[in-house]
Amino acid sequence: MREIDLVDLGERLVKKALSNGASEAEIYIAEGEHHSIACIKENVDRISYLRRMSIGVRVVVGKRIAVQGATISSIDEGEKLVLSAIKIAKISPEDPHWKTLPRKLAKRAVSDIYDDTIDRVDLGELAKDMKSTLSEVKALDKRLSPIGMDITLTKGTRIIVNSYSSTFIDKSTLVTFAVGIKARDSGSESSYYDFVSRRYLNEVNIDNVTRNTAYKALMFLKAKKPPTGRYEVLFTNKVFATFLSAIMVPAISAYWVQMGRSPLAGKLNEQVLSSELTIIDDGTMPKYVATRSYDDEGVETSKKIVFNKGVLLTYLYDTYTALKENRESTGNAVRRNLSSMPIPWITNLIVTPGDAEFSEMTREIKKGIVVYATIGEWLSNPVSGLLNATISNGLYVENGEIKYAVKGAVINADFYEVLRNKVVAIGKDVDNAFNVYSPSILVRDIQVSGE
Amino acid sequence: MDVDAVIKLGIRKGANYIDVRYQDRFYELVTYDTGNLREYSISKSVGLGIRVLYNGFMGFASTNILTKEAIERAVKKAITCAKASSIAGHRRELIEAPIVKDKVKSMFKVNPIDVDPEVKVKLVKEVNKNSIKRDGIKSAITRIGCEVDRRIYASSEGTYIEVTTVLTGFSHTAIAKIGNVMERVHDSKSSVAGYEFIEGNDWLSFAEEVDELALKAVKAKTPPPGSYPVVLDNRIVGLLLHEAFGHATEADGVEAGASVLTGRIGEKVASELVTIVDEGIVEGGYFMPYDDEGVPKKKTIVVENGILKTYLHSRYTAKTLGGKPTGNARAQDCFVPPLVRQTNFYLMPRGYKNDELFEDIDFGIYVKGRGAMGGEVNTSVGTFTFNIGPSYIIRKGEISELVRGVIISGMILETLKEVDAVAKDLTITTSVFGGCGKGGQRVRVGDGGPHIRVRKMIIGGR
């Protein structure tokens, strides 16, 4: 049961802002319910429930803007937040680039982003299934033991209303699942973690993911550092997706471009990547985890080809950055939290798959490393385009044959140089690291620091 | 907030234990980006987290709606979660902890909430505009951050603790561009203090140093890749300890078998020069007199002269693994249950002078923390990594040319054994802009140490 009518709340708060000196106002309301089951080793450790309702207020007084966010318990608290935001806006310097909040809010028809079975899930039974899967790990191989497993089922409601529009409301679900498994053999230890995020619970196959994770944990026993050198490297799909998140995603945001910190600034219509690479941003793909009918300021989402056969065709825009260039938003406004200004960011970033089988790409390697997991890739530098990552799970391959497992070696590369000149093959095997979908990719001549 | 009424309600509904965490947090960020006020953002968060043991099974629920009906629903939901756990879960016991009644505030003179917003805007504007006037500075982000975090912890055992922490800080990021090459350097300073910390520092000079470093770094090369002796400065040594060792001592990971330190209490895990402490209140660090289970966070000696003495514990892990509660159960906020986390994790100083650390290095790297963005560890594989700020090559014992920030990597069970010199100059820092992430939760931490020398670390370069 809901204590506050959220549609009524949004409309009231916009009126409150306009009647107290704001020339424009926008209210964003997010309500989320999360059920989580956490297992340690073979045991269900904890079941928890989180419910939170937050509002984001963006008010404009002429060209002065303020944003505030809060969890609120009553309409009165919402009104206080609006008044507080107006007070801040009035003392803020003018933003000479400010033009307007979005004036034409619109929805794109999207499908399959809400799993209504989540409402009916029996948490006790789901916990029992997880425990049963974990207890079977040792039966796969006596060297294996589970570290843990987590699942979170989220239901979200999002409401946007501004001084030019009626209220928009949408609902979505998200299921995130992670599992970790350890292997021990004659003094050597290894482990492997996998994670899955989907809109629908029935698309998370707990047994399969767990079994694959277990086999990988065995693969990485007796891992060591390879000699420092230059290698062919096969980045598996999720690893490559995390690299794109860390390095390319900020660089294609029009905000970064306009602020002078994107290495892709001034490169529109240039051949930036290999002609083998086509990358799109598509907020409309059925079932994809960031699909929705409108962005975080009520502009309809869309599909954009960002790189067509390696040629940079567009950056991603929200209303503010689009109006600075007298163009239309691409429907990419994202709020990282409700007290922040929206920023243009990806919806679903999708690398078009190639035609290479993963096994073929491995066999093609003369001297190289297949990278299954890294740490620290998020520390790469999106301003300079330099990729840094430490391999936590990898395999050393010579003449197509796996020789030993790798861990602790560091990869360094100019990411754009690699994607322009060093792509050898692109796989068929698309998977997602949250909202970046990518196939595996084989590249050559990569610096790896090890022994 | 009448937490006592919530506890009584939980007991009436059948819980054999209940604890309640109420939080009221204010966070303000004033951001100037390349000549414009990007945002004056204020975030307020109020809510209640409820943890119960019901027939020995644990359940947790949280809500930000604080009406009587919503709180009652949250209590019922926590019990429902505990009952669901009983189908496939295991009973949980908490180790005995002292019953405490206390109300504490961190030291501050000027509450940042009371400072005129125009004063804050004026300062970030001046520093930011000054920065982007410099030749070669393409873009700059300047911020003031202020946090007032009030947490109440109460349990059915009788503990009631109220802690208010005030944290303020200033940060500056400069992006330098020369030709087609760009480089970014970021730095921040924070203190458990009120707005007097902002007023008492020269931020124009602070930003100028960041800008100058970015302008030098953009012209610098990356270091040659490979394995070298390194000298780490005070700031990077905190990051090294936190990533290379701290996470592996967190007992929830140990319990899951996900730490390479599992089963190694009493073993030599580091050089005998290494003594590591986790402490709740320490100069320069974050303010943590009690954890989120109401346990006093005192000085915990984790490693003494190279020997692993204890893991960091919650009440649950201390019971399960047979340790003492160390006050390390911490939650990002009241909406999520606590995990085992570090507080202020630092290396104790020894007798070396800084100069002595460089003396017998023929070729190595002087690793600097200014500009470092963070790190990550995989405690079960045993690898860790962190990035470093613009640093210097060491040639024949002398500090030589600047090199761009890259990443360093190592193995938990090897790196601290390679420490062969520890200096005197201990410093510890915290940050209002970031913290440590684990299991989807971010908490404020402190870390630090003196300069140290490590005989071998992997430097990633091109």
Image (spheres, rainbow, N blue to C red):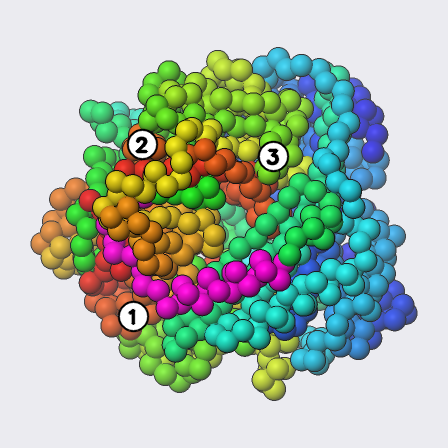
Label 2: chain letter: B
Residue at (26% x, 25% y) in the render: A142
Q: Is residue B433 visible?
A: yes
Residue A247 image-quadrant placement: bottom left
For the C terminus of chain B, the image quarter is bottom left
- Tell me how far mark 1 sits from mark 3, CA to CA: 46 Å
Foreground pick, A245 / B351: B351
- The residues bearing labels 3 and 2 have C-alpha atoms spaced at a distance of 26 Å
> For this rendering, which residue is in front, A358 or B406?
B406
Tag 2 residue: B420
The residue carrying mark 1 is: A417
Res A11 label: none
- Looking at the image, do the residues carrying marks 1 and 3 touch, with CB atoms under 8 Å apart? no
Locate residue B300, reporting x and y percent: 53, 22
Tell me the kind of residue under disc 2.
Asp
Q: Where in the figure is residue A36, as x and y percent of width and height?
A: 56, 38
- Can you tell which of label 1 and label 2 is closer to the viewer? 2
Which is in the foreground here, disc 1 or disc 3?
A: 3
Q: Amino acid at mark 3?
A: Glu
Tally of marks: 3
SS for tag 2? Answer: strand
Mark 3, chain letter? B
Residue under the point 64% across and 76% down = A320
Q: Which residues are magenta?
A: B203-230
> Which residue position holds label 3?
B283
Coordinates of residue A117 in the picture (x, y in percent): 57, 47
Quarter of the view holding residue B358: top left
Q: Amino acid at mark 1?
A: Glu
